[in-house]
């Protein structure tokens, strides 16, 4: 059942559950953080409304920098602003704001350990009709390999709002991975959030599998619990919103307790959440594991729903992975 | 704002002597390190002498003094001249220069801000310094509006401006009319693979930067009066960022090293260093006469 200590949304399983986008949670969070702290500045590369930077830009035009379509310049410029004491938030689509400007992020932000916040929206196949060129499926890998960089993937609107406020207080570089599409509200304003902490959102009695998910796959994993329960399969669902640093203690505890893990993310299998978990478990507690993720392929055009099904990222894929990992225990 | 005047003879000679000492230390540290970039470092010694020993508003014994001018060395590979000028102006002991590129040294092969106070940003990967200078100037403008007394110096290599990031930042500097940005472009005509004209022609440089909204001056980068006048002209501009295209001689001061692309990326061996130091000693004696 849903973990009632976390004040999760009691209407989550209702047909009319409220759905909002994590990018909108960021927009609201940045407005709140910027209201509290005058040192917060925003930069955007010609995607102000799409990335929901417009909320901040309209409230604080004097603290907003429009860089035009220059992702490389945008993040290096943000580093310069951080060197003068600012806390810059630089937003663009995930593909450009991790790939196009990777080396600027590495050298001017991470190598300098500057508190620049890289905000990437439109990640994953949920971008849909825009096609594979615009569907960032490699960004977690690109960012988590850089020293000093923290990587956070909120599961819903509220968590994105809280994560935005939280990263503004870290004095560290952070990568915040968001999506365009609306997903169900899972958490509420009362749900706690802490960078580096994984939370058990669902726990069946005597669980035999640990599902670790991020982003929209947390919603899918929770939905999957309904059929899994009917099928007599007992799981815990962990939201590992911080991919770096991982909450090793929580994750190892549940891996040891269940001896079977399923990871779920809208990213390449290589070097994303599943990769990070594999590194952790291989070194500390080798355990049977299945990965729900894109299998070394590019995306394509289609509706989000069609693509989630095609790339085996839907609830059925999670259920199949659970059944498979059980056989490997 | 200082009034524009020709530098007096005493200052002129003093800066030339500092530049000569900086060059000697560049040779010594590069020979000891066994690797590093000689030509560009020697070529920029006069401009670094001018900035660190004369023009910069800074406190070498208090490197993080908040009101300091900010100097970003974008082409980080010529850091021997940066380190030598910093030591010459009192940031750290001259003897520490001999640790360049060694394990545990604060003087990393390319500058790292977390290793050495006074380094504003880590650099080496090319094309990113002007972006960072713009960010610094924008942050200052948010805080101080037009009341700022700080200047943001950015040093670029000519080969470096092959990088697309440079032209992104040039567009943005022009848009924002950041008049407290003063770029020095080291026009020494060489890069690793040879002469810039052969690798990737850059001219007309002045027209290019003008079209991006910069106030452009082209000077002899070894003429202290010209450097001084150009910087003061730049400071008197209130509508445009400035770029000073400084024509320099790579390897300047050591005749056999001058204008030879091969000296871009290598360090002198013992014999070459002895020769270079003897040439620089000769120059020093002439200056002291």
Image: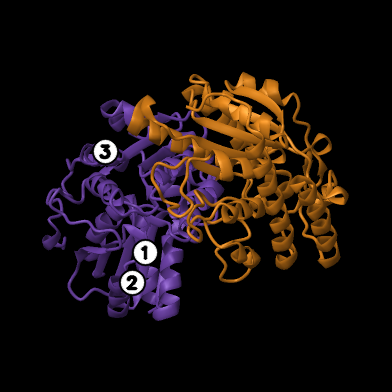
Which label's residue is closer to the chain start, 3 or 2?
3
Evaluate if marks 1 and 2 touch, with contact meaning CB atoms under 8 Å apart: yes
The residue labelled by disc 1 is: A245
- Between A73 and A6, the one lying in front of the other is A73
Name the mark nearer the viewer: 3 or 2.
3
Q: Do labels 3 and 2 share a chain?
A: yes
Q: x%, y% of residue B44?
A: 69, 44
Locate residue B14 relative to residue B114 in the image: left or right. Answer: right
Note whether residue B202 is visible. yes
How packed is label 2: few (under 14 Cα within 10 Å), some, or many (20 or more)? some
The chain letter under disc 2 is A
Note whether residue A119 is visible. no
The residue labelled by disc 3 is: A38
Query: Is B186 situated above or below B261?
Result: above
**Chain A tint as drawn:** purple
The chain letter under disc 1 is A
Chain letter, colour orange: B
Q: Is mark 2 on a helix, strand or loop?
A: helix
Q: Are marks 1 and 2 on the same chain?
A: yes
To which quarter of the image does residue A233 belong?
Answer: bottom left
Evaluate if marks 1 and 3 touch, with contact meaning CB atoms under 8 Å apart: no
Name the mark nearer the viewer: 1 or 2.
1
Name the mark nearer the viewer: 1 or 3.
3
The residue labelled by disc 2 is: A248
At horizontal 46% and vertical 65% (from top left) the residue drawn is: A275
Q: x%, y% of residue B30?
A: 72, 61
The chain letter under disc 3 is A
- Between B80 and A175, the one lying in front of the other is B80
| Alpha-carbon span between mark 1 and mark 3 | 28 Å
| Alpha-carbon span between mark 1 and mark 2 | 8 Å
Q: x%, y% of residue A325?
A: 39, 72
């Amino acid at each position: 059942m849903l973990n009632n200590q976390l004040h999760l949304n009691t209407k989550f399983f209702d047909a009319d559950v409220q759905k909002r986008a994590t990018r909108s949670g960021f927009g609201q969070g940045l407005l709140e953080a910027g209201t509290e702290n005058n040192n917060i500045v925003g930069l955007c590369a010609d995607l102000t409304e799409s990335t929901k930077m417009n909320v901040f830009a309209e409230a604080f035009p004097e603290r907003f920098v429009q860089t035009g379509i220059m992702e490389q310049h945008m993040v290096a410029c943000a580093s310069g602003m951080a060197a003068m004491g600012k806390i810059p938030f630089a937003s663009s689509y995930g593909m450009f704001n991790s790939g196009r400007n990777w080396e600027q992020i590495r050298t001017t932000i991470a190598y300098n350990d500057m508190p620049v916040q890289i905000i990437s929206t439109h990640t994953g196949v949920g971008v849909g009709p825009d096609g594979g060129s615009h569907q960032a499926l490699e960004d977690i890998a690109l960012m988590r390999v850089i020293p000093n960089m923290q990587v956070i993937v909120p599961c819903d609107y509220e968590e994105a709002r809280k994560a935005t406020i939280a990263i503004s207080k870290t004095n560290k570089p952070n990568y915040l991975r968001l999506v365009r599409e609306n997903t169900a509200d899972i958490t509420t304003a009362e749900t706690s959030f802490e960078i580096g902490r994984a939370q058990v959102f669902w726990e069946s009695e005597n669980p035999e599998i640990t599902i670790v998910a991020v982003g929209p796959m947390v919603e899918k994993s929770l939905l999957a619990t309904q059929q899994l329960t009917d099928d007599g399969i007992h799981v815990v669902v962990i939201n590992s919103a911080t991919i770096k640093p991982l909450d090793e203690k929580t994750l190892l505890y549940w891996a040891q307790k269940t001896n079977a893990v399923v990871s779920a993310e809208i990213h390449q299998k290589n070097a994303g959440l599943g990769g990070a978990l594999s590194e952790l478990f291989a070194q500390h507690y080798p355990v049977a594991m299945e990965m729900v993720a894109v299998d070394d392929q590019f995306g394509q055009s289609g509706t989000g729903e069609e693509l989630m099904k095609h790339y085996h990222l839907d609830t059925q894929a999670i259920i199949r992975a659970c059944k498979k990992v059980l056989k490997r225990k | 704002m200082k009034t524009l005047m020709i530098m007096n003879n005493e200052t002129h000679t003093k800066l030339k002597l500092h530049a000569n000492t900086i060059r000697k230390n560049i040779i010594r540290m590069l020979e000891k390190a066994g690797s590093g970039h000689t030509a560009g470092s020697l070529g920029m010694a006069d401009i670094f002498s001018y900035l660190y020993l004369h023009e910069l508003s800074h406190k070498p014994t208090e490197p993080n003094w908040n009101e300091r001018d900010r100097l970003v060395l974008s082409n980080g590979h010529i850091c021997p001249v940066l380190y030598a000028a910093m030591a010459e102006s009192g940031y750290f002991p001259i003897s520490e220069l001999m640790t360049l590129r060694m394990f545990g040294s604060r003087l990393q092969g390319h500058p790292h801000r977390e290793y050495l106070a006074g380094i504003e940003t880590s650099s080496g990967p090319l094309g990113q310094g002007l972006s960072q200078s713009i960010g610094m100037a924008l942050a200052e403008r948010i805080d101080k509006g037009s009341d700022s007394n700080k200047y943001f110096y950015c040093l670029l290599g000519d080969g470096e401006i092959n990088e697309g990031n440079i032209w992104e930042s040039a567009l943005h500097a022009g848009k924002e009319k950041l008049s407290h940005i003063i770029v020095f472009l080291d026009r020494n005509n060489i890069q690793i693979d040879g002469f810039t004209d052969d690798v990737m022609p850059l001219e007309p440089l002045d027209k290019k930067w003008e079209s991006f909204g910069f106030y452009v001056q082209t000077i002899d980068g070894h003429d202290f009066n010209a450097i001084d006048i150009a910087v003061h002209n730049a400071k008197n501009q209130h509508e445009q960022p400035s770029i000073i295209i400084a024509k320099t001689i790579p390897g300047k001061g050591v005749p056999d090293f001058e204008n030879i692309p091969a000296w871009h990326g290598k360090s002198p061996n013992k014999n070459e260093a002895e020769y270079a130091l003897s040439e620089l000693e000769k120059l020093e004696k002439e200056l002291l006469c």
